[in-house]
Image: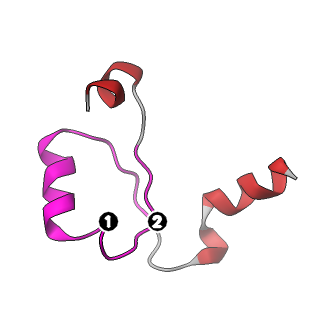
C-alpha cells in the first residue's frame, strides 16, 4: 500500500470473482486505493487489450 500511495498508482483488476469479493473491495476502500470502474465481463471494452496490440 505505501508504494501505491507514494507513486499515485491506480489499481486495475480484471473483475474476476476473487478480485471483486466483498473482502477485497472493502480492503481497497479502507486503504483509499483508487480502482476505476470496470465493465462487467466485456473483453471488447477492456483497456488492457489495446496494450497487447502496442507491444507486438
| x and y, in percent, of residue 17 in the image | 32, 76
Magenta region: 11-38
Label pair 2/1, CB-CB below 8 angstroms = yes
| x and y, in percent, of residue 7 in the image | 41, 22
Q: Is residue 45 magenta?
A: no
**Which residue lies under the disc numbered 2?**
14
Element type at mark 1: loop
Of pointers 2 and 1, the one earlier in the residue sequence = 2
- Determine the image quadrant of residue 13: bottom left
Q: Which of the two residues, 2 or 49, is positioned nearer the viewer here?
A: 2
| x and y, in percent, of residue 1 in the image | 26, 33
Q: What residue appears at the point 35 percent right and 30 percent down from the top-left corner?
A: 4
Q: What residue appears at the point 61 percent right and 76 percent down from the top-left corner?
A: 43
- Determine the image quadrant of residue 46: bottom right
Seen from this angle, which residue lies furthest right? 56
| x and y, in percent, of residue 21 in the image | 22, 71
Amino acid at each position: 500500500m505505501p508504494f501505491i500511495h507514494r507513486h499515485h498508482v491506480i489499481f486495475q483488476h480484471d473483475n474476476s470473482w476473487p478480485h471483486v469479493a466483498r473482502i477485497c473491495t472493502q480492503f481497497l476502500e479502507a486503504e483509499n486505493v483508487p480502482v476505476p470502474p470496470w465493465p462487467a465481463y466485456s473483453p471488447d471494452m477492456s483497456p488492457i487489450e489495446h496494450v497487447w496490440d502496442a507491444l507486438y
